Image (spheres, grey):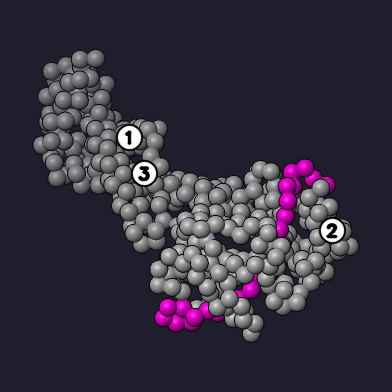
Amino acid sequence: MGIFLDYWKMAFFNVRSNKVRAFLTMLGIIIGISSVVTIMSIGKGMSNFISGSLSSLAGAYYEIYTYEGKPMNRRILDNLVSKYDENTGYTEVLTANATAKGKKEELGIRITSGAPGLELKNSAEIVSGRYFNEAEYEMAKEVCIIDENTAAGLFGSTDAIGKNIPLDIIGREVDVKVIGVRKSASGLSALLFGGNTYSLEMPSTVLYTLFGMDSDAIYDAMVFVDKPENAPQMSAKGKIYVAAALNERGEEKVRTYELNSGVSQFSSIMTGITVFIMLVAGISLFVGGVGVMNIMLVSVSERTREIGIRKSLGAGTKAILWQFLIEAGLISLTGGVIGIISGYVFSLLISLIAKSAANVSVLPDFNIALILISALFSMGIGIFFGYYPAKKAAKMTPIEALRS
């Protein structure tokens, strides 16, 4: 054990005496390890962020709608809910585009309407006021819920409870009263659905009454399930059931939509992309390893006299081999440690940039296993590429080394 400690001391002395050359040799290792650590930590953090965001957006429901076909009716949807215990209820979903006079200009507003259960479609919390209730839905009360962004655009502030919004919905005018304000879309919701759009939620019965529509003709419905993980299975069964009830099987005129099944698929895709980019970044590790081999060959050629003296004093082949292998490993390990620290700093920097630029809170996912593997891998690179120069030095005879 003592002899190996001496080898480490000698390696440290030789590296310290050639600081600039040693650092330039480490540069490839530093770049490679820092790239791998940054990509893996940010990739995992991004995957966690998006998977968590999608899970919260997905919720315990699925949407079922008819496409260029006959509409559903409440009897079909009632039977669908009663047929499967996992289904707990439903609401029609009716959308429309409207315009309203804002604080500075006329704004285009996207209206989403339905029964009180529509509240579950939006994961953003209500920060003031409340959602419309069953009585307001049945009586077609002209009330609405808006988000903070819409409130600011219409009234210049988020203090909008009790204020009226005069809407023009495809030529029909109606005043709706604000009874609730949601948080504005942020993070992934803003990226996917637009954080600067103006939106409004209201009872669908208002639109049915305003346009004289048949409230039993439903083209889009949101069906609630008991657990989010049951949504994919119920979505498939719901599609089959409704298509059979409408006698439109096999024509793809009944379709379903839910995000839950996409969460795991997205996670797998993100993992694959991360691994691929990591492998590409790993090329720089190979380049760094070649640099270690090159510098160790130079070191052997410069220190042939030292090798000859040590051999003539009784140093064996293994002793010389271990001396140069440990030196190569020390160079790579030091580069690996610097690379890990650099990767950590770069990951935090990228996280801060994402937060300030896109309001996306991506926390780098670091773990001890990753750090240890990176450090050991970098040391292994040095030993692997340093073996040939070390072997070359170890095979020298004393006379050959002293002559050189």
Residue 47 or residue 131, whichever sits in front: 131
Q: Earlier in the sequence, mark 3 or mark 1?
A: 3
Q: Residue at x 52, y 61 (%)?
A: 180
**Image quadrant where one finds the C terminus:** top left
Which residues make up the magenta segment? 83-106
Q: What kind of element bears circle 2?
A: helix
Verify whether residue 98 appears in magenta: yes
135 vs 38, left or right, is: right
| Residue 267 sits above or below residue 246 on the image | above
User: Residue 192 in the image: x percent, y percent?
Assistant: 52, 62
Asked whether residue 13 is in view, the answer is: yes
**Quadrant where the image shows the N terminus:** top left
Q: Quadrant of residue 33?
A: top left
Give me the C-alpha separation between circle 2 and circle 1.
64 Å
- Front residue of this view, candidates 378 and 40: 40
Pointer 2 with pointer 1, Cβ within 8 A: no
Q: Residue at x 13, y 18 (%)?
A: 313
Q: Secondary structure at mark 3?
A: helix
Tell me the residue that label 3 is attached to.
Answer: 37
